[in-house]
Image (tube, coloured by chain):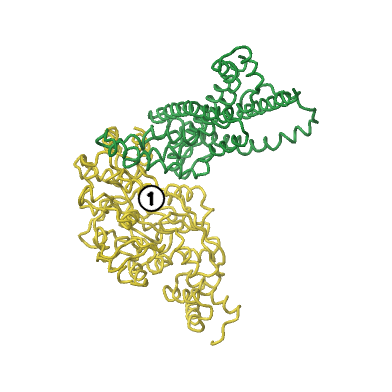
Chain colours: A green, B yellow
């Protein structure tokens, strides 16, 4: 029984970590079970909290405040005038439908990529955590999943060219080998399809990792109990494993959604410059240079991302009650 | 002096050399002596004597100037801020190190406007000056301070190499070379005694095309010919990309422009409507932002014709890829650049002298040769001849790059890579031919902001 107690403690620990992560990402804090640990002096607690707080203030809050400030400053031919406030940066964005259309495309793309990452990432994580019993193989396979991240970002992107290109492997196969097409398919590369493919490949790891850790720390006793009570494997998964792994899925969703919303390098390179995201649009304004409009574009993006994350967290709280 | 100089003496000599070069008062003699001194420490009496004579010839102002020892911070473009240039200047100028910050053109503009104190020298294009010059962040340079001012190519100074040449529309260097003050450009036709930038490199750009698939092409119009549908790329730059598209549209008979270097709103609307309709047809394969992307587009067979830079074409040709750089009958799209000194540098006379020495050094054979071996022309075209002539097989380099003759041997680029094979002839021919017919020069348009907005519409269409 003592081993079960240990697992219980580990589960509690994992839960608390998840909750801490949630509160870090800006959720209205789900009550942290401070009472479970040994009592600490307030000074020690402060010492633990201080580095993170200072870090966030300096590198998250301060830049965000600056971006919002710049977005309402007046653009001049030589940069911007910080003492003249104007909403020109925002009105310029909405003069044409470009920004709104791009924002819509970006959100849809982020949702599609997130959904695909769940579909692909969950089975991988499930297999790693529940299908492999030896911890050694688990670690080995997990490292294997990490492998794409050992390759430089740009290389990972450029590698798609010989696969998806007009003279790439897939088109070669379709046209030359099995001959189902007379002309190569152009839409494989420099298209929305290619961008989504590359983004899923790039970010699926951010979905696999939290789900894997969530599943690996599942309480086996709960599963055994469900089985003993006559639940079918499908029902065990649906009623026990899936609900308990949802916090991991949620964290994965936050990672992937936020990363894809802010993407611009992949979109730029895999899209061949023919497809825009809010990120590439902001970068174009930055290059002009029109910093206030770039900042306005970025501010709206951050606001939309925050709403997206808030919605995800709200969803999770509902699930926790169940 | 048969014995090696004492340390003190050597340092003294170097200081004098740097100072002399810095003031540009002694020109090439001192530059030669400087190089000699950099090359060997005990070069002895001849160079030291040259320096003494030169020092005596200096003006009174010169005597107050202490020799500059330290770093010159240069912000500019990847075209000319390359390692061989840095190494050559530092070898020729002991005591001065260069710190290169390489940025894209808009970023250089932005830095020159917003962080002028972070750099000493700007290396940029003439078409950036409409934006930068009014800020007063850069110094107008008296023509007397430019060592080889009298030798500037007539193309850069007057707009034409020969009377019957077409100077082209847009921000040609001769329209932006002269200044009235630190904040005001002189404008076309006003040759004042001050210049905005000491002119460095220029070249004529066109488009690259796959000769195996398309045969020989001499018109921008090929970009909208039916056989290249879906296989066209443009440079992702609202102004340059649009100019290439505009020349293609004009050549294809779609529309005409009063001034492609400074389009009106109506012209921008018309060409953009055309481009957007073409994009929706799937006409464009991509818009490239970097040199490598342009090379990949062409070499992977994704495009058959695209905006391209001449070294990108050479790179593929050296790999036997059947790409050619067009010599369009409608004319090239030209660009020209140079170096200017930030205003704050004037507060430090010794640094100012060293900065001026750097500017003038660009018109000497060594850097001109390094750039010419990549296909770029120096504003003092004699410097390009001299620089290429100093290479082993110098005549082969001069013949290929400047005279339009077939290469008599394999030619290397400044990084030691063989780029031109024996027997090749440069697309477009000699300097006089390639720089005798410009349709337009890279430009900053009055409607630049509007244009950028429309370009974004185009890209997200």
User: Which residue occupies the foreground of this view, B42 or A76?
Assistant: B42
Label 1 CA crowd tier, 10 Å (few <14, some 14–19, many 20+): few
- Asked if residue B419 lies left or right of residue B32, the reply is left
Q: Position of residue B211 (x, y in %)?
A: 23, 51
Task: Tell which residue pokes out farthest to the left in this image.
Answer: B253
- Asked if residue B247 lies left or right of residue B140, the reply is left
Q: Which element type, helix, strand or loop, lies under badge 1?
A: helix
At 53% from the left and 64% from the top, the residue drawn is: B97
Is residue A252 visible in the rendered structure shown here? yes
User: Which residue occupies the foreground of this view, B10 or A147?
Assistant: A147
User: Which residue occupies the foreground of this view, B36 or B8?
Assistant: B36
Q: Position of residue B337 (x, y in %)?
A: 38, 57
Give residue A131's quadrant in the image.
top right
User: Which residue occupies the foreground of this view, A141 or B186?
Assistant: A141
Is B340 rendered above or below residue B446?
Answer: below
The residue to which callout 1 is attached is B291
- Asked if residue A53 lies left or right of residue B396, the reply is right
């Amino acid at each position: 029984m003592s081993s079960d107690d240990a697992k219980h403690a580990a589960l509690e620990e994992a839960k608390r970590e998840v909750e801490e992560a949630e509160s870090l990402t800006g959720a209205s804090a789900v009550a942290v079970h401070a009472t479970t640990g040994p009592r600490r002096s307030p000074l020690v607690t402060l010492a633990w909290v201080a580095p993170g707080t200072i870090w966030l203030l300096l590198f998250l809050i301060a830049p965000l405040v600056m971006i919002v400030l710049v977005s309402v400053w007046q653009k001049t031919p030589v940069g911007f005038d910080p003492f003249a406030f104007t909403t020109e940066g925002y009105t310029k964005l909405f003069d044409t439908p470009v920004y709104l259309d791009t924002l819509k495309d970006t959100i849809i793309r982020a949702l599609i990529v997130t959904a695909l990452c769940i579909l692909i990432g969950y089975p991988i994580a499930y297999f790693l955590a529940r299908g492999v019993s030896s911890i050694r193989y688990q670690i080995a396979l997990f490292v294997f999943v990490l492998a794409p991240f050992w390759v430089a970002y740009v290389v990972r992107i450029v590698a798609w060219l010989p696969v998806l290109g007009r003279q790439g492997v897939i088109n070669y196969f379709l046209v030359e080998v099995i001959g189902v097409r007379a002309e190569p398919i152009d839409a494989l590369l420099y298209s929305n399809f290619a961008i989504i493919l590359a983004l899923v490949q790039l970010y699926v790891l951010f979905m696999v990792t939290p789900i894997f850790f969530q599943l690996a720390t599942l309480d086996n006793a709960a599963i055994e109990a469900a089985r003993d009570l006559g639940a079918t494997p499908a029902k065990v998964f649906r009623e026990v494993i899936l609900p308990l792994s949802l916090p991991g899925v949620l964290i994965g969703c936050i990672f992937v959604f936020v990363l894809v919303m802010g993407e611009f390098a992949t979109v730029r390179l895999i899209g061949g410059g023919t497809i825009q995201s809010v990120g590439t649009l902001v970068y174009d304004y930055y290059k002009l240079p029109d910093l206030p409009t770039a900042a306005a574009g970025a501010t709206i993006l951050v606001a939309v991302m925050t709403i997206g994350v808030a919605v995800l967290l709200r969803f999770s709280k509902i699930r926790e009650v169940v | 002096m048969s014995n090696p100089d004492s340390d003190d003496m050597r340092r003294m000599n170097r200081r004098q050399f740097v100072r002399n070069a810095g003031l540009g008062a002694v020109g090439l003699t001192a530059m030669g002596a400087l190089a000699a001194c950099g090359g060997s420490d005990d070069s002895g009496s001849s160079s030291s004597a040259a320096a003494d004579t030169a020092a005596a010839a200096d003006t009174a102002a010169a005597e107050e100037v202490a020799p500059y020892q330290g770093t010159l911070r240069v912000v500019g473009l990847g075209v000319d801020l390359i390692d061989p240039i840095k190494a050559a200047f530092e070898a020729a100028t002991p005591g001065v190190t260069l710190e290169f910050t390489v940025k894209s053109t808009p970023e250089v503009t932005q830095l020159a406007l917003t962080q002028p104190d972070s750099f000493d020298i700007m290396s940029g294009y003439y078409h950036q000056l409409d934006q930068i010059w009014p800020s007063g962040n850069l110094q107008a340079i008296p023509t007397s301070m430019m060592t080889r001012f009298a030798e500037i190519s007539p193309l850069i100074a007057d707009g034409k190499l020969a009377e019957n040449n077409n100077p082209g529309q847009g921000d040609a260097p001769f329209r932006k070379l002269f200044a009235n003050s630190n904040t005001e450009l002189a404008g076309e036709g006003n040759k004042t005694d001050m210049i905005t930038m000491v002119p460095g490199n220029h070249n004529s750009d066109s488009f690259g095309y796959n000769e195996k698939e398309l045969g020989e092409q001499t018109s921008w119009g090929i970009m909208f010919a039916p056989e290249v549908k879906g296989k066209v790329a443009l440079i992702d730059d609202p102004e340059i990309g649009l100019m290439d598209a505009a020349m293609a549209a004009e050549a294809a008979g779609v529309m005409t422009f009063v001034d492609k270097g400074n389009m009106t709103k109506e012209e921008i609307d018309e060409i953009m409507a055309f481009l957007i309709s073409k994009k929706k047809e799937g006409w464009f394969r991509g818009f490239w932002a970097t040199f490598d992307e342009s090379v990949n587009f062409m070499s992977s067979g994704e495009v058959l014709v695209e905006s391209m830079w001449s070294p990108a074409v050479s790179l593929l040709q050296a790999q036997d890829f059947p790409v050619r750089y067009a010599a369009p009958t409608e004319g090239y799209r030209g660009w020209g650049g140079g170096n200017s000194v930030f205003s704050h540098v004037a507060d430090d006379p010794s640094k100012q002298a060293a900065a001026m020495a750097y500017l003038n050094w660009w018109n000497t054979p060594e850097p001109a040769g390094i750039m010419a071996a990549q296909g770029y022309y120096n504003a003092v075209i004699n410097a390009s001849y001299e620089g290429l002539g100093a290479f082993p097989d110098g005549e082969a380099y001069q013949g290929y790059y400047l005279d339009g003759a077939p290469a008599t041997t394999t030619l290397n680029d400044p990084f030691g890579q063989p780029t031109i094979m024996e027997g090749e002839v440069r697309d477009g021919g000699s300097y006089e031919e390639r720089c005798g017919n410009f349709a337009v020069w890279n430009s900053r348009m009055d409607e630049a902001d509007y244009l950028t907005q429309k370009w974004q519409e185009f890209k997200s269409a």
